[in-house]
Image (spheres, helix red, strand yellow):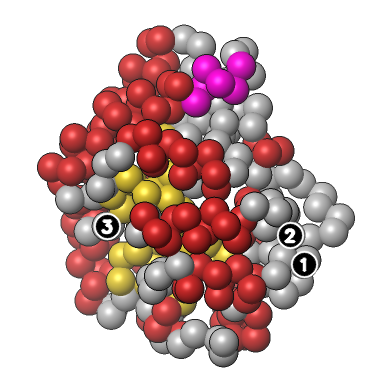
Amino acid sequence: MTSPELSRLCIHTITNKPWPIETAVEEYARAGIGGITVWRDALDGREPSVVRKRILDAGLAVVSLCRGGFFASANPAVRAEAVRENLSVIRQAHELGAPHVVLVCGADPKQPLEDSRVQILEGISAIAGEASRFGVRLAIEPLHPMYADSRSAISTLEQANDICDLLDLPEVGVAIDVYHLFWDPHLPEQIERCGAAQRILAFHVSDWLTPTRDLLNDRGIMGDGCIPIRTIREQVVRAGFDGQIEVEIFSNSLWASDQRRYLDRIIDAYRRHV
Ligand code: ZN
């Protein structure tokens, strides 16, 4: 399989965090990129509908809104607040024109992971009706197990598939991120399982650096690490995914670099390694 077209490339606003969203939109459009995924912090002080118009006028697609979730907590008041917050994220996605919201589902070190998973199920159930009303889908993103303490009790694609099967709701699917899932020997069969249920809503790429110097903000550009990105992309495409391929990189060193040159490197890496 050869590399996909540039129009299939989407970049997350957080990848070029130093740029305000207006600059990111202008630069991505100039480069011929097809889409943008908006992180909520990029909307601070802005009307989502105005941002939507700017994105569409530039010829880009709004691919998704990042992120909702964080449903798990030992404190019931915190869980109730999370549900309220997610309802407003869904409305924000609707105003922005984002077809789905990525869910980082949450975990609480004060309780067992099993408890967090039950609360995640309850949280998604509580917001699914609103998602359906606004035509916004919910993408459960499994996170690497190094984040199982406080960010996500959903660490594998199998767990995400299990939750989707239990919920059995058309608006709920998964986001597959190579950074979080490349290590899992069951990944190919779980991607097939997603395909059979037609639930792959998003595909995120970056690379795993050795050594990784920061657990959160030291992701690499595709090809700079050890993830077999093209192999996983082929599996996802075989499973029926035909959406945009999203570059999501958190990196202190890349954020500190020249953002235009960094964008050129992303495009080159996309052509050669995705
Ligand atoms: Zn991701």
Decide which of tag 3 and tag 1 comes sooner along the chain.
3
Image quadrant containing the C terminus: bottom right
Residue plotted at (42% across, 61% down): 195
Q: How far, Cα to Cα, is label 3 from label 1?
A: 31 Å
Residue plotted at (46% across, 87% down): 5
Q: Quick one: label 1, few (<14), some, or many (20+) residues within 10 Å?
A: some
Q: Is residue 149 above or below residue 51?
A: above
Q: Is residue 158 above or below residue 5?
A: above
**Is label 1 in a helix, a strand or a loop?**
loop
Decide which of tag 1 and tag 2 comes sooner along the chain.
2
Magenta region, main secondary structure: helix
Q: Is residue 118 above or below residue 88?
A: above
**Which residue does the numbered mark 3 point to in the structure image?**
99
Which amino acid is tagged 3?
Pro
Residue plotted at (68% across, 39% down): 145
**Which residue does the numbered mark 1 point to in the structure image?**
225
**Is label 2 in a helix, a strand or a loop?**
loop
Residue plotted at (47% across, 55% down): 193
Residue 85 in the image, given as x and y percentages of width and height: 32, 30
Where residue 186 is drawn, which disc sits there? none
Pick the residue in front: 144 or 33.
144
User: In the picture provided, is 2 more to the left or to the right than 196?
Assistant: right
Which amino acid is tagged 1?
Gly
**Is label 3 in a helix, a strand or a loop?**
loop
**Which residue does the numbered mark 2 point to in the structure image?**
208
